[in-house]
Amino acid sequence: MTAWHVAVTPREARDLTRLAAHLTANPTEDPESFCRDAKRAARQLPNRIAEALQDYRRWGSVSGMLVFSGLPVGPLPPTPVDNTSHLGERTLLARIQALFNEFLGHMLAYEAEGAGRLFQDMVPARTGATSQTSLSSSVELELHTEQAFSQLRPDYLSLACLRGDPGAQTYLMTAADLAARLDHAELALLREPRWTTGVDESFRMGGQRFVHGDVRGPMPIMSGSDDDPFIVLDQDLMHGIDPVAQQLLTRVIALYPILRHSHVLDAGEIMVLDNARVVHGRSPFRPRFDGTDRFVVRSFVTHDLARTRHARRGDSRMVAAQYS
Ligand SMILES: O=C(O)CCC(=O)C(=O)O
Ligand SMILES: [Fe+2]
C-alpha cells in the first residue's frame, strides 16, 4: 500500500504550474476540450506524483486517503457565500486537480451536483448549515459512499483545498479496517444483498422521476476480495431489509468513530478518495461567513466513461439527474 501523504517539492510545484498553463479551455463551456488538454498534460506529471497516483489506484492506502500538500493555490477570491458562483474552477489549484484526475481516469460531472459542473465549490452556506450536504457546517456530515444509491457513482472524489478550517476534519473509514474488526458470520452477511438505499432528495431536480426508481437494492455493503474489499454505505439513506441486517448496519456505524482516520485539509492540499475502498464524512466546524471560510473545490473521476454513456447527452461529461 502507498504512503498516504506526498509533500510536493518547490520544483515539482513549478512543474505543475507550467503543466497547468496548458489547460486553456473553459471547463464549463467546453468540458471536452478542457479534459483533453488535461489528459495530454497529465502524461508529463512529475514522476513521484504519477507513481503515487498509480499506486493509490492499484492498492489504495493504509488510511484510505492520498493527500498531496504544498501545491500552489494561485490568486484567490474571497470565499463565496454559496456554491452558485463557480469560482473554484478558475483557480490554478483546480487545474492541477484536473491533471491528477485525468491521470487517474476521466473527469465526470452530475447534473444534480453543483449544477453539473466539473468543479463544484464546497463552502459553508448559511442556509445549508444543518443539512446533510456539502454546504453544511454546524452538523457532522454523516458517513457515506458518494452516491451510494447509484450504479453511476464516481470511482474517485478529489478535494482541492483553497482555504482550510482548522476545525473541519475529513473522516475516512476503509473497507479493510472494517473487515478486520468483524467476525466471519458478520462478514458473510455484509456480502449478502440485505440493504436498500434511498436517493438523496437533492438529486430529484425539477421533480422528475428516476429511471431506476426511488429505492435501490437490496444491495450488499461489502464486496470484492477478502484482502482488498469494497464498501457501499450511507448512514442517512441506507436501511436493512430485516432486523438482523439493520442491527449489523447499526454495528458498522458504531465502529466508524473508532476506526476512522481523519485529516484537516489545509490550503494547497489535494485529497483523493477511492469511493469503492473507503467511506467518508466530515466533522462540524464554525464558519464566520466573512469571505475567509473553508473553500474546497470538489471533482469526480470515473475509470470508464463508457459506463455512463447512455446517461450523458452528446459529448457532455454530465450525467443527467434522471439517471441518478
Ligand atoms: O468536506 C469534506 O471534507 C468532505 C465532504 C464530502 O462528503 C464530499 O465532498 O463529498
Ligand atoms: Fe461526500
Image (tube, rainbow, N blue to C red):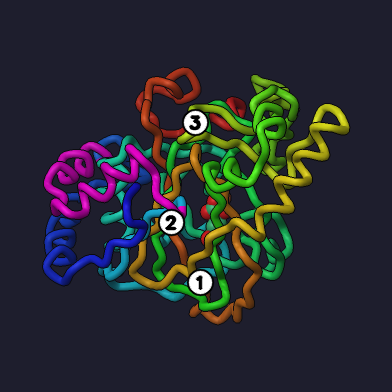
Q: Residue at x 45, y 68 (%)?
A: 265
**Label 2 CA crowd tier, 10 Å (few <14, some 14–19, many 20+):** many
Which-is-in-front pick, marks 2 and 3?
Answer: 2
User: What segment carries the magenta color?
Assistant: 34-63
Cα distance in 3D space between marks 2 and 3: 20 Å
Judging by the rendered image, the residue that carries numbered circle 1 is 294
> Measuring 66% from the left and 27% from the top, which residue is drawn there?
188
In this picture, is 35 found above or below 223? below
Ligand 1 contact, mark 2 (Cβ < 8 Å) = yes
Residue picked out by circle 2 = 159
Taking the image as shown, residue 117 lies to the left or right of residue 104, namely: right
The C terminus is located in which quarter? top right
Q: Is residue 181 above or below residue 85?
A: above
Badge 1 or badge 3: first in the primary sequence = 1
Residue 171 in view in this figure: yes
Q: Nearer the viewer, residue 61 or 147?
A: 61
